[in-house]
Image (tube, rainbow, N blue to C red):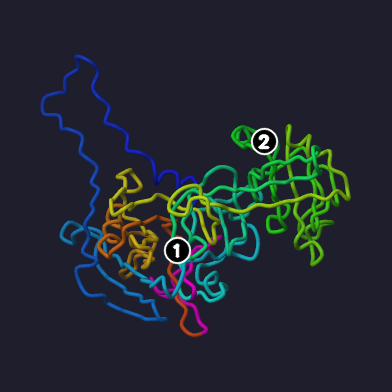
Amino acid sequence: MPALLALGVAAARLPTPRPAAGAGAPTGARRPQQRVCPAGTDLLAASPVAQRHPALGLSIRIFDGHDAPARSGGHQVRLTVAQADLRVVRLAAAAGRGFGAAAETTRLTAAASGALVGVNGDYFAYDWSGAAVPYGPLVRGGRILRLPPGVLRVVGSDAQGRPVAAGVRAGGSLSSGGGTQRWSLPVLSVNDDGDGGPPDRADAADPVALGRGVAVVTPYLGKARPRRSVEVVVRRGVVVAVGHRLSFGARSTWGSGTAGARDVLLAASGPAGVQLRRLRRGTAVTLTYAARFADGPAAGTKVRDAVGSGAVLLRDGRNLASCSVSAAQSRPRTMVAWDAGRTRLWLLVVAARGRGVPVSRYGLTYRQMTEVARSLGAAEAVMVDGGGSSTMAVRTGDRVSRVDAPADAPQRPVPDALVLVRR
């Protein structure tokens, strides 16, 4: 789902305007109707229409039902639930080969080593270069593929592979010199593509643009990076280039080929840029950085896998789902949920079913989806991208296929996915 649509998902319901003082409602006038925001559904009322056990500790159940009572015009929908024993499998992130590379969820799942089941991941948009960019962070196997500045919400796993929904930030530093001459700058972002153009209003809130620290760019991001006043390339802990808009990325002087696979470009502006400009070729530097949870049960620890997330809809067993305009609509949804002990996890996908009806047409409201997760035994639940992105894929032998809809149903290419892999 494009980022602008994702913002609308969490929009608060606007209060009904009050009439001006002294103004009375005309005789016979109807009161504004309250928005209908159903929480119940018949999806779990009957036995599943299909079940699969693709691996030890993993089961898939498919339920058919309606997004509202059929007699009141409810639409036919299908709920697909993957339930995992987290002692056997763990939650991980999957992504395309490079920045901006999007692929169907089935392909991302097939390409992820050891992946048994996968669902689509973060909301995304298309940036200035036309690349499909995740709306939030992307961390895979402890490696940061994208992490803009600030604290950003994710769903993922900690070092032990247990699910976490929390804020994430970049942490680390660039330092050089010795004794009293030693200096250090904080690392504030990793592979933040920015807007690629000249400074604008978007830079006003960017701490790197304000000169408070450095941005790290790896070959994964390549040339799709924001403009900063100073850039430095580091290879194996030694400065090899200093300048502005250095040749970095695929088929470039630095950050390209086997020799440049581990090159890092550092960018800064303002006071941090002044400090960076003092570096000279051949200078040894120390660069450390990692993604760390900013809050929640794993606060302060390193992130193992994560994608940007939408709203937290279930927290400690409480339904937090809003009844905003988009949240109250029947739409395809993808959700990640787990129990209080973080020993069981559910991946849920709901979409339309029925002859001649696109799978991306209907689904459930936020409140309905959250109640389904709670009925399954979940205490925590987080929404990720939905609509035409909602897809669940399962591996059977060497083949990965779609399981939540007909195999030939169209899939929207997405930049990342969440997968269940063997421990």
Residue count near mark 1 (Cα–Cα under 10 Å), binned few <14, some 14–19, many ≥20 = many
Q: Which residue is mark 2?
A: 212
**Residue 212 falls left or right of residue 396:** right
Q: Relative to residue 27, is residue 378 depicted above or below?
A: below
Look at label 1 and name its amino acid.
Arg
Q: Residue at x 84, y 56 (%)?
A: 253
**Residue 308 falls left or right of residue 191:** left
**CA separation in Å, label 2 and label 1:** 33 Å
Under circle 1, the secondary element is loop
Q: Position of residue 208 (x, y in %)?
A: 66, 39
Tag on residue 87?
A: none
**Residue 204 falls left or right of residue 287:** left
Q: Relative to residue 179, is residue 418 depicted above or below?
A: below
Q: Which residues are magenta?
A: 398-423
Q: Position of residue 401 (x, y in %)?
A: 46, 77
**Residue 38 falls left or right of residue 219:** left
Q: Which residue is mark 1?
A: 162
- In this view, the residue in front, 277 or 185, is 185
Q: Position of residue 9 (x, y in %)?
A: 39, 46
- In this view, the residue in front, 154 or 300, is 300
Q: Residue at x 54, y 61 (%)?
A: 304
Under circle 2, the secondary element is loop
Look at label 2 and name its amino acid.
Arg
Q: Residue 402 colored magenta?
A: yes
